[in-house]
Image (tube, rainbow, N blue to C red):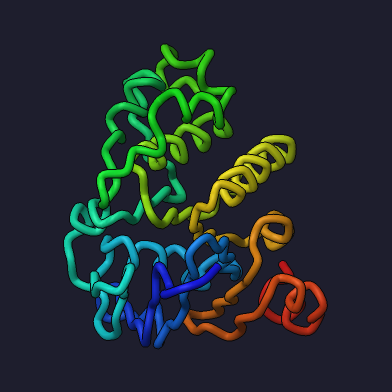
Amino acid sequence: MSGQAVIEVKDLDVYYGTSQILFGVDLSVAPGETMALLGRNGAGKSTTMKAIAGLVPARRGRVTFRGEAVTRQKPYRIARAGIGFVPEDRQIFPDHTVEDNLTIGAKKGPEGQDEWPLKSIYEVFPLLEPLRYRIAGRLSGGEQQMLAIARTLMGNPALLLLDEPSEGLAPIIVQRIGALLRQLRARGATILIAEQNMHFCLGLASRATVIDKGHIVYCASIEELKADEAIRHRYLAL
């Protein structure tokens, strides 16, 4: 990992109506890094992801993507710039087939790159190929999560945002999602994962940022977090 941060969030304040949700949030993700944004339910993880993707407006602060400010751009412009967002509720197209979902998401990257053609998707997501003609709404939760990630990759993003990818899934499916993300990391993908499940992130991320009540309270390597029982107990224990 080297060079300028792919994404940098600085002093970000976000409100829902009159209620402030994020308070001066700072974080950055380096090229090729997998960063975990950890916190309990309601800590501000999803709001941070949505703010980066342009889905909720920032009242104050700045989001810089690959050196360019994207803070107040429309979500479709942020997506075209190279940020791919897999939301917590997946938002697949339930009445379309698996392959239709994938081709709907297909576009070249911001520099015209096409690293994720359909053939590559099926190689990395072998469970999806035999389901290619199945209606997506009939997939299991784990299959839908894989489809949502695969569809986002079809857009050739420079940054992948994953909001609670392990939530509600059986342990064996969580293991498969983890194995998939390790493959993406090995291919050089830059990933920001928002998660309550710290253990899911331990074998994936190199660095962790902890958010609590809308404030960033800790940022260190995963190894340092594993060794810091006080931080884990105070901010991450359920």
Q: Is residue 153 above or below residue 124?
A: below
Which residue is found at the position 69% from the left and 63% from the top? Answer: 198
Q: Quadrant of residue 103?
A: top left
Q: Position of residue 101 (x, y in %)?
A: 34, 27
Q: Quadrant of residue 70?
A: bottom left
Which residue is found at the position 79% from the left and 81% from the top? Answer: 228
Which residue is found at the position 43% from the left and 42% from the top? Answer: 90
Q: 125 or 6, which is in the foreground?
A: 6
Q: Quadrant of residue 13?
A: bottom left
Q: Position of residue 102 (x, y in %)?
A: 36, 28
Q: Position of residue 87 (x, y in %)?
A: 41, 50
Q: 150 or 93, which is in the foreground?
A: 150
Image quarter hosting the C terminus: bottom right
Which residue is found at the position 27% from the left and 81% from the top? Answer: 18
Q: Is residue 100 above or below residue 169?
A: above
Count how many numbered circles sit on residues in the image: 0
**Left-right relation of 23 to 58:** right
Q: Position of residue 179 (x, y in %)?
A: 67, 41
Q: Is residue 103 above or below residue 190?
A: above
Image quarter hosting the N terminus: bottom right
**Left-right relation of 74 to 46:** left
**Left-right relation of 193 to 11:** right
